[in-house]
Image: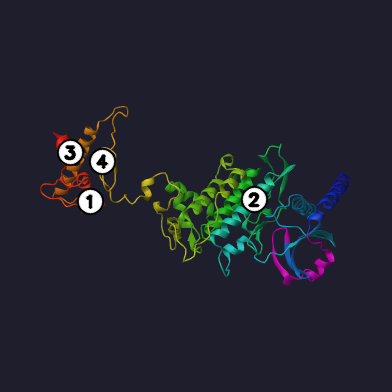
Amino acid sequence: MRALISFALFCVLYMTVQGKVCEKQKYFITYSDVIEGTRHFHQDLKIGGSVFAEVYCGRWGNRSFAVKVFKQESKANWKALWEKFTKEIEVLQLYQHPNILELWGSFSEAGRFCLVYPYLRNGSLFHRLHEEVERPLSWQERLNIIKGTAKAVHHLHTAQPCMVICGNITSSNILLDEHLQPKLSDFGLAHLRPHSVDQSCTIVMDTGSHSNLGYLPEEYIRDGKLSVKLDVYSLGMVILETCTGQKVKQETAKNLFLRDILHSEFEEKGSVDACLRFLDPKVEHWVPAVALCLLRIGLECTGSRMRVRPTMEMVLQRLSQLLPMPTPTEDQPHTLDDTMSLQWPYNGYSPGLSLPTEDDEMYSPLVEHKVPKLEEPCECSQSEVTFLSVGDPNLSHSPRDSLQENDRVVSASQNLQADSAPHLDLYGSWPVECSCTTGTEVQGCEDCCANGFSRSILYDTLGK
């Protein structure tokens, strides 16, 4: 009796919700349209499936649609299927977003639970990353996919009156439209929770309901701890997968996980730069600053400790600072930044690719050729050398003292040049020829005197 009352209350609530949001739907498809468009769910039109459902493609007029049909192998599991069916309807109807898959219709007919969506020809992110495609995704497209997915997750985490914990964010559940914009899908395992409720509660987890445990954190698999940081971890795995082009679970004899490989590399080398060699080689040009930022975000999101993982607000804020840069044409001027893209094959770690860095000498051309450091700072131009005192700034210096210091520096430079040992030419930019007509009785022009080519009467007078 209690179950019937709960079912009736849900139906009333669902009809109310449908009445509010139906006006936002673009298309209105009937169950008869679904049957006709899929030819009674013919196996030739089956395009995918999961533990709970099968997906078919169909035609409706001049439009294509995809329909998810929940499996009902026995009457015993009808309740679990019904919960997933209604949960997905609730999320898709109440939490619409440009990066969340649109719901065209939902039906419970002839013992079938069906959800109808627009058909996206570009398939899933998993398909574009790991299967043979005509053109691999560029780094700009990958960045936009990561950004769009993060926006969808952030929208669900901050929704009112209840937040949504997806619990099933994978590259297979991120669909791509004709413009390669991501659409987050599959909310059958989602959990709605008021913001005031403790977000670290424990639930009973059915590992059989997850097709891939590589996207789930250890605290959820081991203890069943459910929180928004579960989605943060899953998104971090998607980021690492998108950057490297590798599956979250390696198809090797050791069955290593991508997360463990990258974290081990980071901990061993002590720098995110070490992970650059794992970038997807199918991408022709990686911008190091963007790649490093994405890898760093992915590593932070997949941290072992739940509390130190960033929030979706923090993740989205950092991603918003990364803007895809258009590729300049050949006849346009290039900047120094244009030469910083990674060229493949890239077989190792190079500190010169670290952006940003804490050591400016790392990129300085003076690393290999050290210039002797003067004891006191100076400012040089073509016509003069002026020493700046490193003494007490309150002390005043007379013109005579300054000229004596200049004379001392010029003499030191002449001694350096006269030395037979090879020295680094510090004065290559100085003038070597003057237009003045210096004779025996003339000491030279001021420029010659200042640059050390002759001694002026003024210098001799002040030096006495």
Residue 217 seen in render: no
Judged from the image, the secondary structure of the residue bearing numbered disc 2 is helix
Instruction: Name the residue carrying label 2.
Output: 151
Residue 316 image position (x, y, % from top left): 60, 47
The disc, 4 or 3, on the residue closer to the chain's N-terminal end is 4
Reply yes or no: does residue 47 show up in magenta.
Answer: yes
Q: Nearer the viewer, residue 59 or 26?
A: 26
What residue would you read off at disc 3?
Answer: 458
- Residue 436's label in the rendered image is none
Q: Earlier in the sequence, mark 4 or mark 1?
A: 4
Q: CA distance from mark 3 to mark 2?
A: 74 Å
Q: Of callouts 2 and 1, which one flags the residue occurring earlier in the amino acid sequence?
A: 2
Tell me the amino acid under the disc marked 2. Answer: Lys
Q: State yes or no: discs 4 and 3 in contact (Cβ < 8 Å).
A: no
Res. 218 in view: yes
Of badges 1 and 3, the one in the foreground is 3
Span shown in magenta: 26-53
Mark 4 → mark 1, Cα distance in angstroms: 14 Å
Residue 240 in the figure: left or right of residue 9: left
